[in-house]
Amino acid sequence: MNDRTKRAGERREPSFEPVRDDRYEEDDFRLSADDRPYRGGGSEPVAARRGRTQESKPRQSQPKRGRGGRGGGRRRGRSFLGRIAYWGLVLGLWGVLGLGGIVAYHAAQLPPIDQLTVPKRPPNIAILAADGSLLANRGETGGRTITLGEVPPYLPAAFVAIEDRRFYDHFGIDPMGISRALVNNLRRRGGVQGGSTLTQQLAKNLFLTQERTAARKIQEAILSLWLERTYTKQQILELYLNRVYFGSGAYGVEAAAQRYFNKSARAVTVAEAAMLAGLVQAPSRLAPNRNPEAAEKRAQLVVAAMVDQGLISATAAKDALGAPAEAHERIGAGSVNYAADYVMDVLDDFIGAIEGDVTVLTTIDPKLQSTAETVLVETLNAQGGKLGASQGAVVSMAPDGALRALIGGRDYTKSQFNRASVARRQPGSAFKPFVYLAAIEAGMTPDTIRDDSPVSIRGWAPENNSRTFRGPVTLKTAFALSLNTIAVKLNQEVGPREVVRVAQRLGINSALQANPSLALGTSEVTALELTGAFASFANGGQGVLPYVIREVKTTAGKLLYGRKPPALGEVVQPQYLAMMNAMFNETMRAGTGSKVNLAGWEMGGKSGTSQDFRDAWFVGFTSRVVTSVWVGNDDNSPMKRVYGSGLPAEIWGKFMKAAHAGQQPAPLPGGLWHSQPKSIFEPGEPVAGVAPRAPEGDRVWTPPPPQERNFFERLFGG
């Protein structure tokens, strides 16, 4: 009996101590190979297998294992680097998942990618002068769209060099650029460089706000990837150049070139291209018209970057640095904007809604526009202060109504209110031609006699400026000297309603009050409509509708509107026109316009001064130009005895002299009426087209209205 048999026969008390057996290690409860079922295909007994195994394989001692482990021995711990790698991997995976979630969340805030489109650029309206030169741009962008093929290659290259040197290598986001910007910012201890690519800047300008948040940067990155997938690099660069902001209301490189250099982007030099490229980093701080030194330093960095990247030659760089760009005085910062504003006011009437960039060819003469502005501003600067005159307006047009110059105020940068086309002011005696025309059409002539004497109408007693009376005078003399009493009497004779009809027939559209004071210009009108009405006297009696637009085209050349002269017909018959122009000419020869008469030219003119010197006018014409000048104050305060024959006439005379320089004098269409010497009691000759009336002498003594009879009785002895 061996020891195993003996132990089997002995009674043993239960114990929780592990059973010791030389075949097993302490605490090892795994099955040995002998204890596992036979997996072969036969039916070899387990005992036989155990015996054979024990005989064929010597037993080897197993290393002891501690209680804490299930394998042999205590488990060896991971190294420090291993644990770092492990947890780094875990954290990296979680970071990727978290970042993916954040990106997905912010992507969900954007429109669906399959519905995403680049928003249309707001249309630009390029307003051109009659000679085709640019007067002004209107629209949100300040300039038209331009293609890469239109500009010199160094212009887009300048932007790539300074803003995104790896533009053609990255996929919309440039990790290397971001890293480089971070390093440079840390070295300089300040946020002086950005890591945004041109594509990211474009995405921000097209779709996002300017706020500086992490959410916006994430959306910017997403949109940049979409742009790179959807468009070519050249298309992205072209979009960028047409959308980036350059300050001063200029969006796009064309608008910026016009704004700062008064030229198209197609004509900029290397130095100007470098300055424009450097400007986008900080448009307000680097604007060349505000901070030329900072703008030049930035442009030098751009030129250096272009040379470093092989985008321009060393010679071109030397030339650019030797002749740096300079901001020019802005064309259109002054008076042309009044004309441009008027163009925009009427443009909708011709083409409706504007879908894309258009060019508007106008009738404005840039030389006359500049001359009118210069004369008005210089005269007001010299005399306006002492005379209490702070504002003025000038309207000049061809006799057919084509506007040549339109000045709506003294300084557009300080006041954009257009006093030429919008402001309604009392014309004073400048309204009298409509009264006299009504009288002429009623059968009178320039030789008709009326009495310059006191007049009172229901308590209203107008006086002449001289506070004196001349007695019997011809209408020609009364017109030339602008006698108020005669105009009031004529207005009463023909009737205020008839005077209103005559004024409206010639183009006065403002509301006119048919009352006795109408003769003295108490109903307000605009300078534009008054000038247009006078144009009928300069063109042979034809109706005039002032206009400023000749044609409108798309940038592709498609005609959207072309002006066709309207058939307004005759508004002043020839025989009456000759009489009116004779009276107008007498004003320039011996009346209130005698100081500004142009030698050799047949001219007509009329001054006007409203009550208390609140408005002063001079309106006159030749066969070539019709011009009006208004002077006054926006608050309607009185000036210091400024008559129409004074300051306005002076401005008018200087402008008209310049406008007619080098021109061959020409007579007024229809000629001038000439009177025949006769007694005032001699019967007047019938006027063609007018039914015969009583002799002029009889009409002189026709009993006046009761309110005037006492004056005639005192004058002629009852």
Image (tube, rainbow, N blue to C red):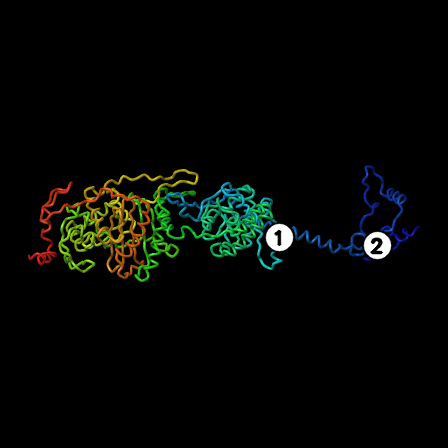
Q: Of 46 and 63, which appears nearest the observer?
A: 63
The Cα–Cα distance between marks 2 and 1, rounded to whole angstroms, is 58 Å
How many tags in the picture? 2
Q: Left or right: 39 with respect to 515?
A: right
Image position, residue 253 (x, y; %): 49, 47
Q: Of 114 and 660, which appears nearest the observer?
A: 660
| Image point (11%, 54%), residue name | 705
| Residue at the disc numbered 2 | 64
Q: Left or right: 184 with respect to 705?
A: right
Q: Nearer the viewer, mark 2 or mark 1?
A: 1
User: Does residue 420 appear in the picture of this structure?
Assistant: no
Residue type of the residue flagged with mark 1: Arg
Q: Of 240 and 718, which appears nearest the observer?
A: 718
Q: Earlier in the sequence, mark 2 or mark 1?
A: 2
User: Does residue 165 appear in the picture of this structure?
Assistant: yes
Dot 2 and dot 1 residues touching (CB under 8 Å)? no
Q: Quadrant of the C terminus?
A: bottom left
Secondary structure at badge 1 equals helix
Asked which quadrant contains residue 52, the reply is top right
| Image point (27%, 52%), residue name | 596
Image position, residue 342 (x, y; %): 35, 48
Please determine whether, in this image, residue 570 is positioned above or below residue 431. Answer: above
Q: Which mark is residue 20?
A: none
Image position, residue 664 (x, y; %): 30, 43
- For this orientation, the residue located farthest to the left is 718
| Residue at the disc numbered 1 | 180
Q: Left or right: 266 with respect to 45?
A: left
Residue type of the residue flagged with mark 2: Lys
Dot 2 alpha-carbon crowd within 10 angstroms: few under 14, some 14 to 19, many 20 or more: some
